[in-house]
Image: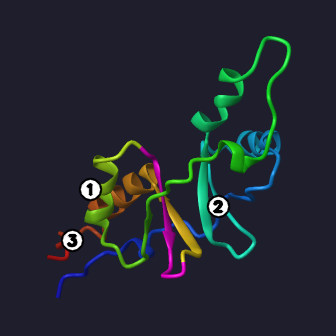
Amino acid sequence: MDKIYKIEDFMDKTFVILSPDMDVYQAIDTFLKEGVTSAVVADENKKCVGILSEKDCLKLLAGGSYHQLPGGKVKDFMTTEVYCIPPYTDIFKVADIFLHNYFRRLVITNEDNMVLGQITRRDMLRIIKKLHKGDGKEKKIAPIM
């Protein structure tokens, strides 16, 4: 029987999570230190409340002046409409979601909206490479119908 690959088989379980009450400049420092372009924002119960991206942080420049940049908390700049998926989503559905949306990261949550992991477009490229390379044998992978 052919294996149906689900995103839980590939999701990143160790990644940057920001607090909504974190200072936005501290979040920018974290982006630069960790080499990430965005991060999940979760509350104290690990429930997803948003995403903060580099693009969101550019609002600091757009709303500032030459002599003073505005400040604030991550929650003041983050995107609150986050596309979350359950861990049992198949990889073909995830690829389709990325193809039809502008974002680069999906948050994987359980039924209570608690963050379990994430998957990025770059991770999807790693999946393609892994499935193509395989063990030298031809792989059959079928999406859920």
For marks 3 and 2, the one nearer the N-term is: 2
* Residue drawn 82% across the image and 44% down it: 26
Is residue 108 a member of the stretch shown in magenta? yes
The amino acid on which the numbered mark 2 sits, given as a three-letter code, is Phe
Please tell me whether mark 1 sits on a helix, a strand or a loop: helix
State the residue position of label 1: 96
For marks 1 and 3, the one nearer the N-term is: 1
The amino acid on which the numbered mark 3 sits, given as a three-letter code, is Lys
Instruction: Residue 85: give its label.
Output: none
Instruction: State the extent of the magenta-drawn residues as a range.
Output: 103-112
Left or right, residue 103 beside residue 53: left
State the residue position of label 3: 137
- The x, y position of residue 68, in whole percent, is 84, 19
Local packing at callout 3 (Cα closer than 10 Å; few below 14, some 14-19, many 20+) is few
* Residue drawn 39% across the image and 71% down it: 7
The amino acid on which the numbered mark 1 sits, given as a three-letter code, is Asp
Instruction: Residue 15: give its label.
Output: 2
Left or right, residue 76 beside residue 8: right
Left or right, residue 83 beside residue 5: right
Instruction: Compute the Cα span from label 1 to label 3.
Output: 26 Å
